Image: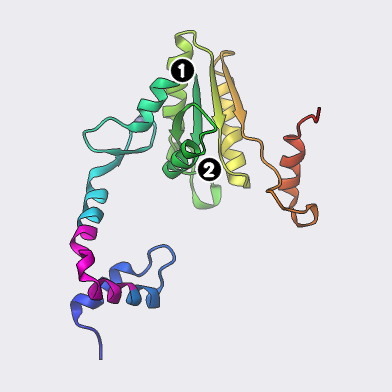
Amino acid sequence: MNYPPSIDALIEALKGMPGVGGRSAEKLALWFLSHKKRNPIDLAEALVNSTTQIQLCELCGFFQEKEETCSACRESEKHPHTICVVEKASDVLSMSRSNTLKSGYHVLGGKLSPLDNITPEDLNIESLIKRVKGLVSENQPIEVILALGADIEAQATAQFIANRLTKLSSLCSVTQLAQGLAAGTSLSHADGLTLKHAFDGRKKIS
Ligand SMILES: [Zn+2]
């Protein structure tokens, strides 16, 4: 025996979401059905709205509500001399919520990965070059902070972008977040790349 088709369809729709396998999808579907007071219509509307009303900003790659100004671009206007480059749109929020940085943002939309056929043309690199060109043409010094991951693909992406940007103008400096050992990590558990970053990012102790 199976569930009625509508429930099966709900289970199918939920299955495959991050962290949701067949059993979890079934549990969630039954939870929705038994908690109707929580108004699943609101959830359905939020899902439809977020998927139809949200697009990626053509300038910086962040999420943008259709026909509204991009909030990351507004932030960039406040801090025109610093652009923090991140891999994913959600990284903008992580950086912004950390309150450690006053900067504009640029989202690459991924990282270079020859194995997955992801080339520079697949990422928002040209739009970044264009932004930086525009700023240095006004004789403004600018710092581009590459806040990408510590894995090999992210590092190759950072290197590629750094090579492109440093050729543009001496007014453009490119920096990268210091990376290294996570708090509580012992040296014996760190891999070679992490240790290299930890050494490269070492600071003087006064
Ligand atoms: Zn934007």
Q: Is residue 116 above or below residue 201?
A: below
Position of residue 134 relative to residue 108, above or below, is above
Q: Position of residue 105 (x, y in %)?
A: 45, 31
Q: Which mark is residue 112?
A: 2
Q: Earlier in the sequence, mark 2 or mark 1?
A: 2
Q: Residue furthest bottom?
A: 1
Residue 88 in the image: above or below residue 34: above
Question: Going by the picture, which residue comes out furthest to the top?
Answer: 139
Residue 181 vs residue 204: left or right?
left
**Residues rendered magenta in the picture:** 28-44
Query: What is the count of numbered marks?
Result: 2
Residue at coordinates 24% horizontally, 53% vertically from top-left? 46
Badge 1: residue crowd in 10 Å (few <14, some 14–19, many ≥20)? some
Residue 91: x and y, percent? 47, 42
Left or right of residue 181: residue 107: left
Residue 133 numbered mark, or none: 1
- Regarding mark 1 in the picture, which secondary structure is present there? helix
What percent of the width, then of the height, locates residue 100?
55, 33
Rendered location of residue 127, percent (x, y): 41, 28
Q: Quadrant of ligand 1?
A: top left
Per the image, is 10 magenta?
no
Name the residue at 25% across, 87% down.
2
Residue under the point 49% across and 8% down: 139
Label 1 sits on what residue type? Lys
